[in-house]
Image (spheres, helix red, strand yellow):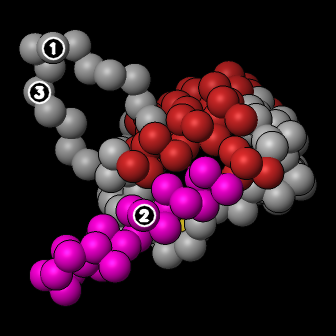
Amino acid sequence: YLCFFGTHVGDAGASAIAAALGRGALPRLKSLQLANAAIGDAGLVALAPALRRRPALERISLTGNPFGDEGLTALVAPPPLPVKAPLPTCVLTKLKQLRLSNTQVTDAGCAAFASALGSGALPALERSPDLGGTPASPAAKQAVHSAYGTARGRRLAEYFGGSEW
């Protein structure tokens, strides 16, 4: 568990955390709380690859940070790989909870998030992420909730060996 709540981490601090994780720090990290830590898009873009390589990660709270669409997209929908690159291992496979309230995520970030959910990202997510207090429109937030519901129904159907719920 790593928690910085209300502590100014900023983009430089997020980059430093990413570097430490990249060197192998906290290999069994299950919960990361970086709430109200002044992390913008640049910080989350730097941190996202290191988080996606943490197989035990179950909870991430990023509430109250000024990142927006670019940061969220880097976390949930990594850029496409070159054609000849090996297939990536599934990322954030155990993530059960992702808190994003009071960030600067807009409709574009919600669209990227919904697309990622539709592609099978975050397969263990237990509830639709909280996007309260973001500038995203109600329709964009609903699209994320709908994509989560569809993905969850698909997972349950696979688990029980039947058709979608």
Q: Residue at x 40, y 70 (%)?
A: 152
In front: mark 3 or mark 1? 1
Observer-nearest residue: 34 or 153?
153
Secondary element at tag 2: helix
Measured as percent of width and height from the top left, residue 155 is found at 29, 71
Q: Is residue 126 left or right of residue 17?
A: left
Frontmost residue, 87 versus 3: 87
Tell me, yes or no, whether the highlighted magenta stretch contains residue 143.
yes
Task: Give the foreground label among 3 and 2.
Answer: 2
State which region is magenta.
Answer: 142-165
Asked if the residue under mark 2 is in contact with the one under mark 1, i.e. CB atoms within 8 Å, the reply is no
Residue at 76%, 35% (x, y): give it.
106
On screen, residue 55 versus residue 33, left or right, reads left
| 92 in the magenta segment | no
N-term-proximal mark, 3 vs 2: 3
Residue assigned mark 2: 150
Q: Pointer 3: what residue?
A: 86
Three-letter amino acid code at the position of disc 3: Pro
Mark 1 vs mark 2: which is more N-terminal? 1
- Label 2: few (<14), some (14–19) or many (≥20) C-alpha neighbours in 10 Å: some
Residue where numbered disc 1 is placed: 83
Q: Could you say whether the residue bearing mark 1 is in a helix, strand or loop?
A: loop
Instruction: Please state, as top left, top right, bottom left or bottom right, where the C terminus lies in the image.
Output: bottom left
